[in-house]
Amino acid sequence: MSHEAALHNHEGHGHDDHGHHEHHDTFLTKYVFSQDHKMIAKQFLITGMVWAVLGGLMSVLFRLQLGYPDASFPWLESILGKWAKGGQITPEAYYALVTTHGTVLVFFVLTAGLSGTFANFLIPLQIGARDMASPFLNMLSYWFFFIASIVMLSSLFVETGPFSGGWTAYPPLSALHDASPGSKTGMDLWIIAMALFVVSSLLGGLNYITTILNMRTKGMSMTRLPLSIWALFFTAVLGVLSFPVLLSGLILLIFDRNFGTSFYLSDIYVNGVGALSNEGGSAILFQHLFWFLGHPEVYIILLPAMGMVSEIMSVNSRKPIFGYMAMLGSLFAIAILAFLVWAHHMFVTGLNPLLGSVFVLLTLLIAVPSAIKVFNWLTTLWRGNIRFTPAMLFAIGFVSLFISGGLTGIWLGNAALDIYLHDSYFVVAHFHIVMGVASMFGMFAGVYHWFPKMYGRYLNNSLGYIHFWITMAGAYLIFWPMHYQGLAGMPRRYFDFSIWESFKQFAELNRFISTVAMIVFATQILFLINFFYSIFKGRKVTVLNPWESNTLEWTTPINPGHGNWPGEIPEVHRWPYDYGKDGHEFIPQTTPVGEDESGTH
Amino acid sequence: MATTQLETNTKIHPYKMLLWVGFGSIVMMFAGLTSAYIVKKSQANWLEFDLPNLFWFSTLVILVSSFTIQMAVKKAKAGEMAQYRGFLSVTAILGLTFIILQIRGFQALELNNVALTGARSNSAGSFLLVIAGLHLLHLVGGVIAIAVISLKALAAKSSTNQVLSVELAASYWHFVDILWIYLFVFLNWVG
């Protein structure tokens, strides 16, 4: 890394951590019940990483089943016990694995792990605040997440297994104890975990919004905020407005499960139970409530990645972000549209076709702000003096995946096509690329970029490059073929495709996908080793501003204490993207506007 | 951007803003429930029934309590401790009265053969229980907050340190009041 030689930097004062709010912390208040936003961010990150490993491991297990449906792996039985009798994963275990994989990755990794980490870490540092509006609520936010994690984890160990009706938890599988083994205790624990998770996400979101609106340092107007902050702001708004609706849906579900009400259940006939005594409930009602959260949730996952990618791309292209206001406007447009498209998940529920076509139109409208963002990222790169740090590679990888996955969104957003493609591997491929892997890339980019600020040490670059290239190639090798499988009609959530004549042609492809999935998972272990090794043994950061970045977090000491700045909080005089302006490589936000400086950028 | 005008920190206290953003999320929760109510009502199998009079009384009680807590804020600002404590306590008692009236209201419905839960229940009654019940939980939270502030007020010699707390509690209380008015109107006439 040649670019850490800082031109305009002061020598960092590594142990100067006498922030305004520095107390004499015990181990418990510093590392466990910490109210320092930076420590809470690390808690979210590491808990999210634990979940990412577990969720990823689950996908390896069910890919093993899909790739080798006839094989028997005796070691599986020794790990999973009765869930892999005879060395083959049972159908119940398979459904439990895909359900938990989905829930965990969507909520625990890409919501809490992503925006929990970076909203906590970046908001006070980049807007110039000593901490969040309410550090106490912020701490509670983490601990609610932690308890939710414990409850969800414990559902893996109950006798009837974790919930197995899909991460969307549609009734009647979720509403009826007798519907499946996972619908019993596993589902109770799932609901409790999710309710706790909603509380955690609300407490966090309230804090993020208030902090951004209310605690900015002098001179930090809203249009001088880095795009990462804008993205985290809209993310928080989406979360605060949509998670409560999921909670409403879950409360009605609890009543149906435990108090005999008929919100979602009707007099359906259940094998072994007979006709239910419920009357007039509508399972579709749950889908509406679920997807009213579910679709904004997609953007809750995606927007933080978008914001961080914008920031990282500008820094590492040594160019201003192209079209700051357009970037901001498109974030806003996406946030609004996020609330108006939920029924495109429900085209096959017997939705009124006229209503369906309205949702088609609104869904396709999302292509406009998305295309603006892609255009602006590419034009930011255009003729830039690009530094290919691992963070930058992951940011570019994000854009690549966002384009690839976004294009298939145009297919699926059309009701006429979706009726054919619904619940097929095409959908699996689409959302894994555009939301799952793309956001993971945003998260990796963020970790590689801000690791020096988090721990005062660098990650190993070579391992970073290996991690990037294998993951990037792997993402496409895993999910690209799934489009063809989906187009051929291969449905998602099936336990074993080898018994269908029409899908036998994919046996080899499934094996290939599974093999790549395992290689990619193994590569993530490389990242984990890099991460934890570097926390303790990584090369030390010796300059304040290793990436020569303009934003405020790099004006803090190398290892900032609670309170972030030892003295006064710096005043901000300009937007964060003055790169390559008036012959200067970069001009930090704290530099006053010079007299002969050109006004526009 | 370099050319935009400077903004200083806004005047509103961060905790107040936290509370107001929190109102937004509570509103969305009830918007979700009342929307579900409308959807469900338009489908078959909906039981029509009138709300018991008890809910009218509880509405009156909560309206009055909004007035008393506002008086508590006024007295806290003026530093008139005795009256401040008085209005706080009256508000807490009115809150408890509201809780009792709501529960009696649910019981009156059950006595009228409108089952709220269980095998005989219709989702019309269940919705009433869930919506009014969740509102009641939010109000219980307010009563607890007021009780805590009252205890502190009894111990404190002056009210200067309590103005922010009682203002926050009052905002929340008014919010829960207005929320109930909306729900009451909705359950009576709209839904």
Image (cartoon, coloured by chain):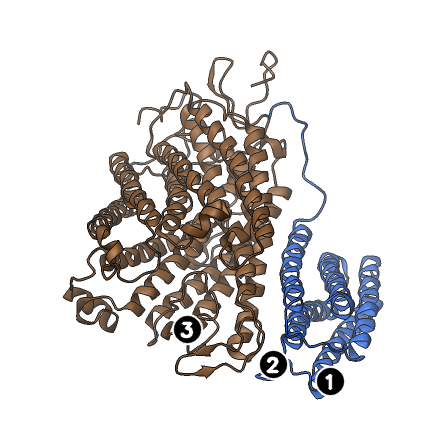
Secondary structure beneath dot 2 equals: loop
Q: Chain of mark 1?
A: B
Task: Relative to A512, say whether A311 is above or below.
Answer: above
Q: Is residue A158 left or right of residue B184?
A: left
User: Which of marks 1 and 2 precedes in the sequence?
Assistant: 1
Could you tell me which quadrant the N terminus of chain A lies in?
top left
Along the line of sight, the residue nearer the viewer: B81 or A278: A278
Residue A459, picture quadrant:
top left
Residue contact at pointers 2 and 1, CB within 8 angstroms: no
Q: Amino acid at mark 2?
A: Thr
Residue B117, numbered label: 2
The location of residue A171, given as percent across then percent down, is 48, 68
From the image, tell me which residue sits under label 3.
A183
Q: Amino acid at mark 1?
A: Ala
Secondary structure beneath dot 3 equals: helix
Residue B108, numbered label: 1
Task: Relative to B20, say whether B173 is above or below.
Answer: below
Q: Chain of mark 2?
A: B
Residue A529 in view of the camera: yes
Q: Chain of mark 3?
A: A
Residue furthest toward the bottom? B111
For the residues beneath circles 2 and 3, the answer to whether they share a chain is no
Q: CA distance from mark 1 to mark 3?
A: 34 Å
Q: In the rendering, what colour is chain A?
A: brown
Q: Amino acid at mark 3?
A: Ser
Residue B162, picture quadrant:
bottom right
Secondary structure beneath dot 1 equals: helix
For the residues beneath circles 2 and 1, the answer to whether they share a chain is yes
